[in-house]
Amino acid sequence: MEVIIQPNPSDCAAAGARIIGKLLEAKANAVLGLATGSTPLPLYGELVRMNRAGEVDFSGVTSFNLDEYIGLPGDHPCSYRYFMEQELFKDINIEPGRTHVPDGLADDVGEHCRAYEQAILDCGGIDLQILGLGSDGHIGFNEPGSSLGSRTRIKTLTGETREDNARFFDSIEEVPRHCITMGVATIMECRQIVLFAFGEAKAEIIATAIEGPVSAMVPASALQMHPEVKILLDEAAASRLKQKDYYKEVFAGKPSWQCF
Ligand code: GLP
C-alpha cells in the first residue's frame, strides 16, 4: 500500500491522471474501473483536459463503474450513469458502447449482477480501479459488514450514506434505499487500485482504513491485502495518519523508475 500525500486535491488528481496516462500508453485497450461522488471530479477534469490536449487516448478503453442506485433510470440526474456521462464520458473519446454502469432498473437484479461480473471477466478483468471512500469506510457501496468475499450484488444503504448523499437529491426521502455494487472481492481482483480521499471529514476513516485492523466493518481496510494500491490524499485527509511523515519520506525518496 503506497500512501501519497499531496498539498491539495488538484495535485492528487494530476498524479492520478498521470498513472492512468502511463497505463494507457502501455495498454491502449485497458479496462478502467470508475467511481462516482465528488472525490473523483478533479481527476475527471484533468483526464478531459489531457484528452483534449492529445495527451491521453480513450478510444480503446473499456470502463466498468462500481455502483448504481436501484430505481433510478440512467437519464435521472442523480443516477450514476448520468453522472458519468456528464462528468467524463461526453467529454472524452471513449466508445459509448464500452462504458458499463450497473442498470438501476434491471428486472432481475441477481441475474444482472452475475452478468456484470461475467462482462468484467470477458474483458480480461479490470486493470485499474479508481475509488473514493464513504465516511463509514465503504468502497463502491459496500457498507460496513459487507463480506470481504462479496461479489456484485444488491445492498441496502446505511442511514449515514443516505444522509451523506442527500445533498445530490431534493430531500433525503428521495435517496434510494437500495443499490447495486461491485463486491469487495470484485474490487480486490482489479490489478491496480487508486483510492482518493480529500478533506478533514475523511481524516479519521482514512486512518482507520489504512492503519487499523482489516475488518468487514471497514470495507476499505481490505485494500491492505492488495499488492498494488495507491492512496492519494490531500494534507487534510492525511492529518490523522500515525505514519504520515514516513509516507512522505518514502515518496520523496522514490527511485526514478518507480515515479509517474
Ligand atoms: C458514494 C459512492 C462511493 C463514493 C462515496 C464518497 O457513496 N458510492 O463510490 O466513494 O460516495 O463520496 P464523496 O466522494 O462525494 O465523498
Image: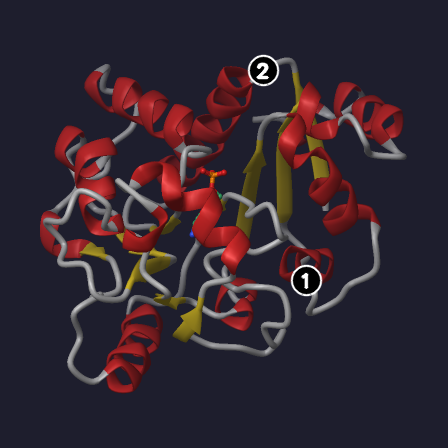
- Residue 36 seen anywhere in this rendered image of the structure: no
Residue at (26%, 80%) from the top-left corner? 109
Secondary structure beneath dot 2 equals: loop
Residue at (46%, 60%) from the top-left corner? 141
Check residue 94 in the rendering and tell me which mark sits there, or answer none: none
Q: Which residue is tagged 2?
A: 8
Q: Is residue 217 left or right of residue 64?
A: right
Q: Who is closer to the viewer here, 166 or 80?
A: 166
What amino acid does circle 1 point to?
Answer: Ala
Q: Who is closer to the viewer here, 99 or 144?
A: 144
- The colour scheme applied to this rendered structure is secondary structure
Give residue 259's position: percent from left, percent from top: 63, 26
Q: Who is closer to the viewer here, 132 or 176?
A: 176
What amino acid does circle 2 point to?
Answer: Asn
Q: Quadrant of residue 87?
A: top left
Check residue 222 in the rendering and tell me which mark sits there, or answer none: 1
Q: Quadrant of residue 213?
A: bottom right
Q: Who is closer to the viewer here, 174 or 252?
A: 174
Secondary structure beneath dot 1 equals: helix
Residue at (77%, 18%) from the top-left corner? 252
Q: Is residue 249 left or right of residue 140?
A: right
Residue at (87%, 24%) from the top-left corner? 245
Give residue 55's position: percent from left, percent from top: 30, 21
Give residue 6's position: percent from left, percent from top: 65, 19
Give residue 173's position: percent from left, percent from top: 32, 54
Looking at the rendered image, the quarter that the C terminus falls into is: top right
Q: CA distance from mark 1 to mark 2?
A: 26 Å
**Residue 220 sits above or below residue 24 on the image:** below
**Residue 219 sits above or below residue 44 on the image:** below
**Residue 206 sits above or below residue 152 on the image:** above
Disc tally is: 2
Task: Classify 10 Å Cα crowding around label 1: few (below 14), some (14-19), many (20 and above).
Answer: many
